[in-house]
Image: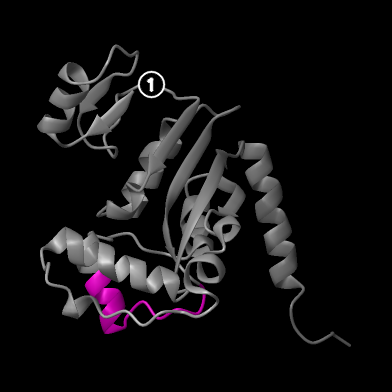
């Protein structure tokens, strides 16, 4: 079952595709059917467009099977150390509609508020050795502002290309699973113990 805000996409899936078992519903991924639990929820280059990442992750966590459910996200992430506030990052975010743009660690921190624990994070670009094989180990100079095409989506993709090649944007597969109340209490106890033990030794 897929969800989309586009009536055109619904019509395409229902009338243009070869015979399939896939169904698509018109609606937001923040507003899932009441009382329905899913074995898996996946988002491919969609989560980054969420205008409220807290509402999104809470909705997904609330509708995930508590015992064996998984959330799989494939998307762009801010690389650790990269500055999200630079002009080029802002141009990327505007063109790509990157409303929820975080490092993997930041996303994990938010997800844990809703009972989700990250069980895997995989760099999907590393095996392709893009700089080595495509650019002979030299990061190319790119200037999207000089491109003749200037519509929003195109410019977003050009800034995305530049920042990815420069190592400022990562492309990862991230998997979350819902934690039981027992597991969460153990994690919270360990964190509490760790934080209370920080500091100079007491006499």
Residue 73 sits inside the magenta stretch: no
Q: Nearer the viewer, residue 51 or 24?
A: 24
Q: Residue at point 43% right, 71% down? A: 165
What is the span of residues highlighted in magenta in the rendered image? 80-92
- 22 up-or-down from 120: above or below: above
How far across and how far down the image is residue 186, in percent? 71, 48
Image quadrant holding the C terminus, namely bottom right
Determine crowd level at label 1: few under 14, some 14-19, many 20+ residues with C-alpha closer than 10 A: few
The residue pinned by badge 1 equals: 36
Q: Residue at point 36% right, 52% down? A: 54
- 154 up-or-down from 201: above or below: above
Report the side of 186 relative to 27 (left or right): right
Q: Residue at point 53% right, 74% down? A: 136
- 112 up-or-down from 152: above or below: above
Q: Quadrant of residue 159?
A: bottom left
Image quadrant holding the N terminus, namely top left
């Amino acid at each position: 079952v897929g969800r989309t805000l586009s009536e055109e996409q619904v019509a395409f899936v229902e009338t243009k595709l070869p015979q399939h078992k896939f169904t698509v519903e018109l609606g937001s991924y923040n507003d899932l059917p009441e009382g329905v639990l899913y074995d898996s929820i996946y988002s491919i280059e969609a989560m980054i467009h969420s205008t409220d990442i807290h509402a999104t992750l809470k909705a997904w966590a609330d509708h995930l099977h508590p015992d064996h459910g998984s959330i799989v996200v494939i998307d762009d992430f801010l690389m650790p150390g990269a500055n999200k506030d630079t002009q080029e990052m802002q141009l990327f975010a505007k063109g790509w509609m990157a409303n929820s743009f975080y490092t993997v660690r930041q996303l994990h921190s938010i997800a844990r508020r809703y009972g989700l624990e990250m069980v895997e994070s995989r760099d999907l670009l590393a095996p392709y050795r893009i700089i080595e094989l495509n650019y002979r180990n030299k990061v190319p100079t790119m200037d999207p502002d000089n491109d003749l095409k200037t519509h929003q989506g195109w410019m977003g993709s050009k800034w995305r290309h530049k920042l990815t090649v420069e190592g400022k944007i990562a492309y990862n597969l991230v998997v979350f699973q819902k934690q039981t109340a027992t597991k969460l209490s153990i994690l919270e106890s360990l964190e509490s113990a760790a934080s209370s033990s920080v500091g100079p030794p007491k006499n």
